[in-house]
Image (tube, grey):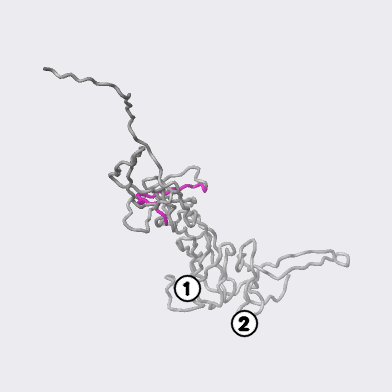
Amino acid sequence: AAASVTVTNLLNGETFATCEGTHEVPTDKALANGQYYYARVFALNEIGYSLPQISPTSQKPHVVPGSPTSVVLSVVSETELRVLFNPPADDGGDTITSYQIDYSTSSSFDSFSSVFVTYLAAAPFTKTISGLATGVPVYVRVSAANTQGYGDSASSVPTFLNPYQPSDAPTQVFLRATADTMLTVSFGAPVDNGGDDIISYRVQWDITPTFNGAVGVPNKGSVDLDAALYSSYTIKYLTAGQNYYVRVFAINSAGPGTAALASPSALAPSLQVPGRPHTITATTGSSAGEILLSWQRPRIPAHQIPCSGLVTAPNDCDAGIGGGVPQSNGGASITGDE
């Protein structure tokens, strides 16, 4: 015979939604960046805790890295700069995957271009920035990235550089006899400064045209002159009648450029007529038909090139061998004025 079962509903049941959620631990954020942690979760009811469910993988806390260190900028050529840098002191707890190098002609980086370094075999890292305009200052900054993104950037030292190369030769290089022991050479700025300010000029002289004569000072020598203070220079203590060859270099941050031979290329010191008197004034004399004149001794030699300094700020000529008056007198005593 068939059995029968009577079912009595004692309590309405309840279907629970999926139990899931998120929780940030620990609340004081005391975990170490870069350290891997595992987690497990317990369910709790009025009876107690369940067995835990353990996460199948570990995770680590990490943030974006700090800024790179020791960022140094240098010039490679007239169109290239090189940036060298080291990793950040803090990688944010994650491996550095790339570096971004921004460069701009604006210190505020209103607009900029970027290049990237992703080959990170060994520090320090370098990157050459190419295609730059000669002489135009370029600002550079570098930032590091991990899986969280890019961190703060670090500015280079110096903060900017202008690509440059050695300059062209100086212009208007003229050689003139000042006295029987002196030659004066003048020089002007090169047509192309190589993209960088001329900081000095080098005057070189020798008794041979190849500038490798087996003689010493004063028949052979050189001197570097501040470009802001000199456009001419007088070579002293030379031998009367001996031909001297002279050339001049312009120097920027890249070093000496092409030499300019003086015109004429060689000259011997010799006595000259005096330079022009200066500061001439005329006043009415004490008698009828009388005029009183006053003047100063010549300060610039007869060739009209200052012995040294600038045309706008000439220096007095040096005295000759053994002392005496400045050699703007041509090397011989002035015996009278007319």
Residue 329 magenta: no
Q: Which mark is residue 322?
A: 2
What amino acid type is highlighted by mark number 1? Asp
Q: How many neighbours does mark 1 have within 10 angstroms: few (below 14), some (14-19), or many (20 or more)? A: many
> Which of the two labelled residues, at mark 2 and mark 1, occupies the earlier sequence position?
1
Looking at the image, the residue that sits furthest to the top is: 1
Q: Considering only vertical position in the picture, is 9 above or below 143?
A: above
The picture places residue 167, in percent across and down from the top left corner, at 47, 58
Left or right: 10, with 145 as reference point: left
Residue 295 picture location, percent across and down: 74, 68
Q: Residue furthest left?
A: 1
Dot 2 alpha-carbon crowd within 10 angstroms: few under 14, some 14 to 19, many 20 or more: few
Label 1: which residue? 206
Q: Which residues are magenta?
A: 89-107
| Image quadrant containing the N terminus | top left
Closer to the camera, 260 or 269? Answer: 260
| Local secondary structure at mark 1 | strand
Q: x and y percent of residue 209 in the render?
A: 44, 70
